[in-house]
Amino acid sequence: MRKSAITIINQKGLHARAAAKVARVAGGGSSDVYVSVGARKANAKSILELLSLGVALNDTVSLEVKGPDEDHVYERMADLFAARFDEAV
């Protein structure tokens, strides 16, 4: 299992377009992928679950990836978060 804490640096937080990108990357592998904030946990393959977390700028989320392709999926997810979901600052 790969797990890390990531601070959201996207100005709009984890909004609908960003959540869709996260779900697309998470769904591209067979590993289980979860994003959590405090006690709230969302399946990263579900846009609605991600949006229900209400993640904003400077919030710290926990990214957890577990499964047969966890290294690949984790790296893609970490890159997406680091790139501010490929959106302008």
Image: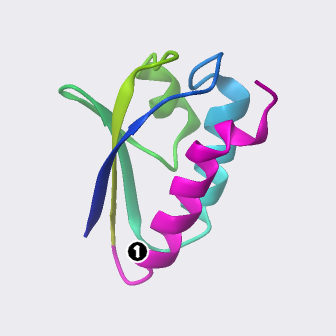
Residue 64 versus residue 54 in the image, above or below: below
Identity of the residue drawn at 60% across and 56% down: 79
Q: Which residues are magenta?
A: 67-89
Q: Is residue 52 left or right of residue 9?
A: left
- Looking at this view, is 70 or 83 the one in front? 83
- Looking at this view, is 80 or 16 the one in front? 80
Residue 39 versus residue 81 in the image, above or below: above
Identity of the residue drawn at 62% across and 26% down: 10
Percent position (x, y) of residue 85? 69, 40
* Rendered-image quadrant of the N terminus: bottom left
The number of discs equals: 1
Q: Is residue 39 left or right of residue 61?
A: left
Q: Return the residue at label 1.
A: 70
Q: Residue furthest left?
A: 39
Q: Main secondary structure of the magenta part?
A: helix
Going by the numbered disc 1, the residue's amino acid type is: Glu
> Which image quadrant for residue 62?
top left
Percent position (x, y) of residue 14? 57, 26
Residue 75 lies in the magenta-colored region:
yes
* Rendered-image quadrant of the C terminus: top right
Q: Residues within 10 Å of mark 1 (few under 14, many from 20)?
A: many
Percent position (x, y) of residue 86? 76, 42
Residue 46 versus residue 52 in the image, above or below: below
